[in-house]
Each structure stands twice: as structure tokens, then as C-alpha cells.
Amino acid sequence: MTNTITLKDIYDICDRLEQKMDRRMCTVEKKIDVLESFRDNLLGKIAVITIFISAVFTLSIAWVKDKLGF
């Protein structure tokens, strides 16, 4: 009895491995998408807060300069 491995056998084995890897990659991509959306949301909020603080700081410096006559 000779056991011969055909090209179809190799293709079947590779296909099963590809399917397993694809399922794993899809779950990882879903998790990464959630983390990226959280990070993007947080960066947007930080940008708005930074703009507000910068505007308040600039206006207060301008007010102080106006009062001191610079």
C-alpha cells in the first residue's frame, strides 16, 4: 500500500488553514476597530478641550495686556 499525497490533498489542507486564519483575523480586526474608534473619539474630545483652553488663555492674556496698557 502506497500512500500518495496528491496536489488536491495539499490544497485542501491549505484551504482549511486559510479558513482558520481568516476567522481569527476577522475577530482580531473587530477588536481593533473598537479600540481605534475609542481612540479617535478620545482624540477628538481632547482637541476640542485644547482649543477651548487655548482660546480662554489667549483672551485672558489679551485682557491683562489691555488693562496694563501694553
Image: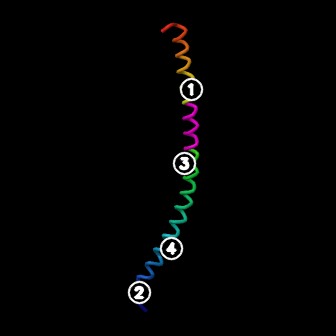
Residue 63: say if magenta.
Answer: no
Q: Residue 53 carries which label?
A: 1
- Is 13 rendered above or below residue 56? below
Q: Are marks 1 and 3 in contact (CB under 8 Å)?
A: no
Task: Point out the stretch of residues depicted in magenta.
Answer: 40-50
Q: How crowded is mark 4: few (under 14 residues within 10 Å), some or many (20 or more)?
A: few
Percent x, y for residue 7? 41, 82
The first of marks 2 and 3 along the sequence is: 2
Cα distance between the residues tagged 1 and 2: 74 Å
The disc, 3 or 4, on the residue closer to the chain's N-terminal end is 4
Secondary structure under tag 2 reads: loop
Name the residue tied to disc 2: 4
Does residue 48 sit above or below 27 in this rendering? Answer: above
Q: Residue 16 carries which label?
A: 4
In the depicted structure, whether residue 65 falls above or below residue 41: above
In terms of depth relative to the viewer, which is nearer, 46 or 28? 46
Q: Name the residue under label 3.
A: 36
